[in-house]
Amino acid sequence: MARLFADENIPVSVSNELRKQGHDILTIFEAGMANRRVDDESVLAYATSQQRVLITINRRDFIRLHARNPNHAGIIVCTHDSDFEAQAIRINRLLNDTPMLNGKLLRIITNSPANSVAQRGYGASGAAWSAGVRCLVRHQGQGQRDRSAFARCG
């Protein structure tokens, strides 16, 4: 299972659900970094140093950080979802379907009316992919889409 680092905006209930699903998750609270005004760059650097995929709801800032420096263990950005169990299930599904996250940014976007989800990702080149419930995982450094890299995400 995946080694994860939950930013302080990820609900504890989501972290607990991911633990139940077998993931090794460390929260920013457990790392002693919560409520200390730690900047996002330091949060990502810590996750990277611990070889943990960062999970956050802070999409804008971490998408920017990824574009500046894709050398990290992976970033999953989510939209807010009050159904914590469903959010954890979607994260788990994405993790199971995307075995290598190094240098990748993955997005889980929840559309609240139908509670459907689309995943998007950004490779090291900054190029985006999006395919509803199918994800195109782009490998670091590739300029062209690798059609063999499609993974089922939902």
Image: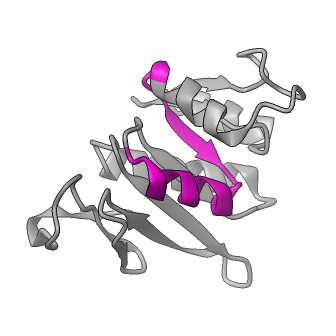
Q: Specify the quadrant that holds the C terminus.
A: bottom left
Horizontal and vertical percent position of residue 82: 81, 59
Q: Residue at x 28, y 43 (%)?
A: 99
Q: Residue at x 78, y 15 (%)?
A: 32
Horizontal and vertical percent position of residue 72: 41, 37
* Residue 86 visible from this viewpoint: yes
> Which of the 4 quarters of the picture holds residue 131?
bottom left
Q: Residue at x 78, y 37 (%)?
A: 8
Give 15 or 73, whichever is nearer the viewer.
73
Give 54 or 37, whichever is nearer the viewer.
37
Residue 60 falls inside the magenta stretch: yes
Classify 119 as above or below 130: above
Residue 84 falls inside the magenta stretch: no
Q: Specify the quadrant that holds the N terminus.
A: top left
The magenta region covers: 49-70
Horizontal and vertical percent position of residue 133: 40, 74
The residue furthest right is 35
- State how many labels appear: 0
* Residue 20 visible from this viewpoint: no
The residue furthest bottom is 113
- Along the horizontal axis of the image, is 14 left or right of 151? right
Horizontal and vertical percent position of residue 104: 37, 51
- Along the horizontal axis of the image, is 136 left or right of 82? left
Classify 90 as above or below 130: above
